[in-house]
Image (cartoon, rainbow, N blue to C red):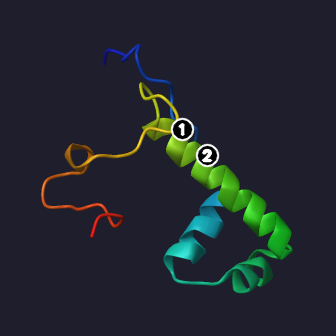
Amino acid sequence: MAANLNQTPTQALSEPEAQILLLIAAGKQTGDIAAAVGTDQAAVKEHIKAILRKAMGSRQTGRSKGTDLGLSDFPSGMRSPFIA
């Protein structure tokens, strides 16, 4: 398998980040997530920031920061939620 030299490796989520992401996907609120993982809401918010940084970092490869997504950037049949 040849490596693509134009992309940076995707950072894996830590165990707490993975747990928090699953709880978010289940529709839990920040306070419920904090209680479930045994931490406070501030820590949960920091983990969420880390999750987003990792997710956006892998999508921003080859893009300048701050670039808006155009219609052609979405898979066919999928529309941006920001376009009426």
Residue closest to the eye, 18 or 68: 68
Q: Secondary structure at mark 1?
A: helix
Which label was assigned to residue 53? 2
Can residue 78 be seen in this snapshot?
Answer: yes
Q: List the residue tagged with mark 1.
A: 57
The picture quadrant where one finds residue 2 is top left
The amino acid sitting under disc 2 is: Arg
Residue closest to the eye, 50 or 83: 83
Which label was assigned to residue 11? none
Q: Position of residue 81 (x, y in %)?
A: 33, 67
Is disc 1 in contact with disc 2, using a CB cutoff of under 8 Å? yes
34 displayed left or right of 73: right
Residue closest to the eye, 77 or 8: 77
Q: Position of residue 58 (x, y in %)?
A: 48, 37
Name the quadrant of the C terminus.
bottom left
Q: Position of residue 26 (x, y in %)?
A: 51, 81
